[in-house]
Image: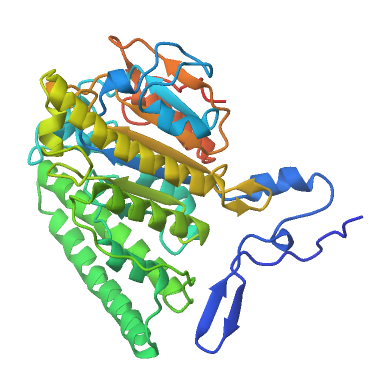
Amino acid sequence: MTPLNTRLLSRRTMLRATGVAIGLPLLDAMLPSGLRAEEKAKKLAPRRMVLISRPLGTHAPFLFPEKAGLDYESTRYLKLLDGHRGRFTLFSGLSHPGHAHHHSEAGLFTGVAGEFIRSEKDLRNTISLDVLAAEQVGRETRFPCIGLGGAHSYNRKGVRMPSLGGAEAIFRQLFVDGTPDEIAREVQRLRDGRSILDGVRQQARDLARNLGAGDRERLDTLLTSIREAEERLTQDEAWVNKPKPKVNYQPRDFPEKELAERSRQWYDLIHLALQTDSTRVINLHIHSHGQVNVPGVNMDHHEASHHGQDDAKIEQLAKVEEAEYRVFNEFLTKMQGSSEGNESLFDRTMVFHGSNLGNASAHTSQNLPIIVAGGGFKHTGHVMYDRKSNRPLSNLFVRMLHQMGIQADKFGTSTGVIGDLG
């Protein structure tokens, strides 16, 4: 009989030697045991969210099968994901109402009403899915959420959040400790930052007494950002003296034309960040517009995506998109092969893969190419909704929030909740 764990080992326990601290994987000793231990462990297990966006849509005839359910006939792109059939759900007939152009990428993860997305300079956005999730689960990790590749993440006032930078810089922030002097300077910088914010906050409040309603609203947006910065500074200071996990990986900053290698490295960093529990929420934007090094492709990705039904351009686009789906499949395989307790990292991480455009050639945002993988869902293969009268994508976001343990009745332009993910 397995003895009961009367004292649980902390998830943050590390092996320490001179100048080195190694984070442990999730061990049985970190989980409760005894009566219904498996159920308890599942409830305590961290749930994670990865959002992946691509700006140029997907050629729909090569993605969507004609049949719903799990026994669909694989299309050209789905053949690349066949090893994970039953572990992901492909949705057709989802979109955000009123979104209709390239600028809609700003609203992909906020679900803001279409009339508020007219241009980058005339944008009234709302909170994005990753930031809302991080408000609930982010306090458990060094980074509440991470934006990669120029991610479109927005706070509660619709202000865009900064990404962490290039791959090498992100790797240093995640896994490289500073020297004692660097850590001391960082602590002082954080304290100085909080002192500055305290002064600015009081000045803003004093100023607000003499402003009109419109200006007070704009000032409130500033104060919200200040409050978020203060919370971030407080959390940063709590983590700055804790050693970072050590991993055996050497990043490099690939140029945009190296689409497959650049995407593969982003996925590697995501896998490492999740595996070390450095964060539980990640938003990745895979930007690709120019020339890409894909065999058989001799035109810009953007030009191929705007094919105008030219068969030669569509074939070049297909080669680019096959390269993207092939690397995405590698990522899912790596997540599935990483165990955490009695589950895989894949089981505990919902992975959203999609685009703000359904047809880049026509600049339409209908019938978006949406895949949700992993995350402990009961996946149903291909879910078909009306491709002319789409359901709100935000209904799916509500379901994803529920899976994270976040009670939400509404998100963005939702009208309910998707019931086709068990």
* Residue occupying the point 62% across, 53% down: 340
Q: In which quarter of the image is the C terminus?
A: top right
Q: Is residue 169 left or right of residue 381?
A: left
Instruction: Depth check: give the residue in front, 254 or 118.
Output: 254
- From the viewer's side, name the closer residue of 107 and 287: 287
Q: Where is residue 227 in the image (x, y as percent from the top left)?
A: 30, 59
Quarter of the picture containing the N terminus is bottom right
Residue 88 coordinates in the image, percent (x, y): 49, 31
Which quadrant would residue 144 be assigned to in this image? Answer: bottom left
Which of the 4 image quarters holds residue 125? top left
**Residue at 38% in and 51% down:** 267
| Tally of numbered discs | 0
Residue 304 or residue 44, whichever sits in front? 304
Q: Is residue 368 above or below residue 206?
A: above
Q: Where is residue 38 in the image (x, y as percent from the top left)?
A: 75, 45
Left or right: residue 85 compared with residue 41: left
Q: Is residue 279 visible?
A: no
Kindly indicate the quadrant of the structure image that contains residue 300. Answer: top left
Q: Give the residue at the far right of this rendering.
A: 1
Which is nearer the eye, 397 or 275?
275
Residue 259, image x, y percentages = 24, 47
Q: Can residue 32 be seen?
A: yes
Going 31% across and 25% down the picture, which residue do you hit? 413
Q: Which colour scheme is used?
A: rainbow
Q: In this view, does 182 lie above or below 118?
A: below
View extreme (front): residue? 296
